[in-house]
């Protein structure tokens, strides 16, 4: 571990009062063990042989066949893609570090391939970095809910490009969600009914054996935090180190039949809180430091949204709507430079609405339209088989209206509409082996739970509640901006690295306060989130994005 980074950690660590830490050694109960039922499922699967071959520069790829249904370990199979970047110091290699970047529906092989761009030298030296594309996702066997693009097209038109705003758009969105749920429950089967997070956790346990590791080492980001909680509770004695960063409370993820997902995990509330904090700080910083500070930033932002709702902005062949603007503001908040990105974008839109389109036109000219892929199917295959949801898609508009009142701008965004396809009357594909808890198992090794105060997608409260629920866990909090903490600030990254390397977590309730803050002139000094763009929820035509993005991903993040 680099000495300078250890000094950063030592200088900014504090105790967060009032948040429950881990149990003391004197009261620690005996660790839980993997249940006999789970052991029978995964241990009956022969250890796969991975035939690695060079694929991308510095990486190796393989395909593995695993059971579609772990109740039938020698029955039908599903092909899954695996990628690894081998440890640079093989003589001192610790083992494999499995990554999952979230979504659901985001490729783990792609983030593993990009690991050299954002992970620390210490981890790259000592671990093979491994990504397993989940069932239906990325280079694994894709889930397809329609037999052709022609059949899919009218349903996508009903769903629109982003999220519905008008009454007519909401009615069409409900209709499209119903048709999508029905398609995934018929044409999408059997894979759409075998994509639950529990199956992915079982896949990781088999792959752990395949790469030769006695116990799993894992870093899960965003939805990957749900996967980490599932693995820790299904296999509480089978990991050596497990980090969940950008945490969704797994109990809220599973949910109930009375509430839509955002009512349970409050992503929209976290996004609104972060946006208003950016606007308030912009106002305090003044026009020299913040491009959007002239006048009242909060009021000016509201004016932009009202004008776009009344009449979209057209520049050349591009149309900027209220929905596209809010979506791109949210995407900008995924970056460590969220404050500057959001306010610059808002300033350019305000100028364009007032007739000065030059800056926005330059941004549009430099952007490419994203291609469509199967991200909606891939995300929904996980989301809808994991959780419990209201019966009818017609129940969403009223629930969304209530969310809009508590979380301005984002309470009616795709953060809240994304699970409409999961209405149980129309999404009838079920995984009888889905896991619904408990999520409070006492694990043999400690779990590191990481939350960022201003995360725009995975509300910080999720990290707090999860750390309180898991007896053998530590909470690491960070003041960085953007989505998740790893590679966003030196302090949080150093603690995560140290735990993954040694298995020893930081003291309970450690707080990192070193990350650059908006409008202070501080530039990101660590990894700037390079490669972490895969965590973004969607790619829009004019948002400030990191290089290499491109997918129609309506997933969580």
Image (cartoon, rainbow, N blue to C red):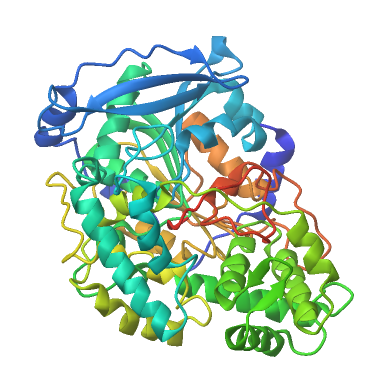
| Quadrant of residue 405 within the rendered picture | bottom left
Report x, y in % for residue 155.
35, 62
- Nearest the viewer among 405 and 502 is 405
- The residue located at (58%, 73%) in the rendering is 326
- The residue located at (30%, 42%) in the rendering is 232
Relative height, residue 523 to residue 139 (above, below): below
Quadrant where the N terminus sits is: top right
Report x, y in % for residue 174.
31, 73
Report x, y in % for residue 329.
62, 68
- The residue located at (45%, 78%) in the rendering is 412
- Label tally: 0
Task: Decide if residue 51 is on the left or right side of residue 192.
Answer: right
Relative height, residue 1 to residue 103 (above, below): above
Task: Decide if residue 283 is on the left or right side of residue 482.
Answer: right
Relative height, residue 215 to residue 288 (above, below): above
| Quadrant of residue 38 within the rendered picture | top left
- Nearest the viewer among 74 and 11 is 74
Q: Is residue 237 visible?
A: no
Q: What residue occupies the far front of the structure in this picture?
A: 150
Task: Decide if residue 407 is on the left or right side of residue 146.
Answer: right
- Nearest the viewer among 550 and 199 is 550
Q: Is residue 480 visible?
A: yes
Report x, y in % for residue 470.
31, 52
Task: Decide if residue 397 is on the left or right side of residue 61.
Answer: left
């Amino acid at each position: 571990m680099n000495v300078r980074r250890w000094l950063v950690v030592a200088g900014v660590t504090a105790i967060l009062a009032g948040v429950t830490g881990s149990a003391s050694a004197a009261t620690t109960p005996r660790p839980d063990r993997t249940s006999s039922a789970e052991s029978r499922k995964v241990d009956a699967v022969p250890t796969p042989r991975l035939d690695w071959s060079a694929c991308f520069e510095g990486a190796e790829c393989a395909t593995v066949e695993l059971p579609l249904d772990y109740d039938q370990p020698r029955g039908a199979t599903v092909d899954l893609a695996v990628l690894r970047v081998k440890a640079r110091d093989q003589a001192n290699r610790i083992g494999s570090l499995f990554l999952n970047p979230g979504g659901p529906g985001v490729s783990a092989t792609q983030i593993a391939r990009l690991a050299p761009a954002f992970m620390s030298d210490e981890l790259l030296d000592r671990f093979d970095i491994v990504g397993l594309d989940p069932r239906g996702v990325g280079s694994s066997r894709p889930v397809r809910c329609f037999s052709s693009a022609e059949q899919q097209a009218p349903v996508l038109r009903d769903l629109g490009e982003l999220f519905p705003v008008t009454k007519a758009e909401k009615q069409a969105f409900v209709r499209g969600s119903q048709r999508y749920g029905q398609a995934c429950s018929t044409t999408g089967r059997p894979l759409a009914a075998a994509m639950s997070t529990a199956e992915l956790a079982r896949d990781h346990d088999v792959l752990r054996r395949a790469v030769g590791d006695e116990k799993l080492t894992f870093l899960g980001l965003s939805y990957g935090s749900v996967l980490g909680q599932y693995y820790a509770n299904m296999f509480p004695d089978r990991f050596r180190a497990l980090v969940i960063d950008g945490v969704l409370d797994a109990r809220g993820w599973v949910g109930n039949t009375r509430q839509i997902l955002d009512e349970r995990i409050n992503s929209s509330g976290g996004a609104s809180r972060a946006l208003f904090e950016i606007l308030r700080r912009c106002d305090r910083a003044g026009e020299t430091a913040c491009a959007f500070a002239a006048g009242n930033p909060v009021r000016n932002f509201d004016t932009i949204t009202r004008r776009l709702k009344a009449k979209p902005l057209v520049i050349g062949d591009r149309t900027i709507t209220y929905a596209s603007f809010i979506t791109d503001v949210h995407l900008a908040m995924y970056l460590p430079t969220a404050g500057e990105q959001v306010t610059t974008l808002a300033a350019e839109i305000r100028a364009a609405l007032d007739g000065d389109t030059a800056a926005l036109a330059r941004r549009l000219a430099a952007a490419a339209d994203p291609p469509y892929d199967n991200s909606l199917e891939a995300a929904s295959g996980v989301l809808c088989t994991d959780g419990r949801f209201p019966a009818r898609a017609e129940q969403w508009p009223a629930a969304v209206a209530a969310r809009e009142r508590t979380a301005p701008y984002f309470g009616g965004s795709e953060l809240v509409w994304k699970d409409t396809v999961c209405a149980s009357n129309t999404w009838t594909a079920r995984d009888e082996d889905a896991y619904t808890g408990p999520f409070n198992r006492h694990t043999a090794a400690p779990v590191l739970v990481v939350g960022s105060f201003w995360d725009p997608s995975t509300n910080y409260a999720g990290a707090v509640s999860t750390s309180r629920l898991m007896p053998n866990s530590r909470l690491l909090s960070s003041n960085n901006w953007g989505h998740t903490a790893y590679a966003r600030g030196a302090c949080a990254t150093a603690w995560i690295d140290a735990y993954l390397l040694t298995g020893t977590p930081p003291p309970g309730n450690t707080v990192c306060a070193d990350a650059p803050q908006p409008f202070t002139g501080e530039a990101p000094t660590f990894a700037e989130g390079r490669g972490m763009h895969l965590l973004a929820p969607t790619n829009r035509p004019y948002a400030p994005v990191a290089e290499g993005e491109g997918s129609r991903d309506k997933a969580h993040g």
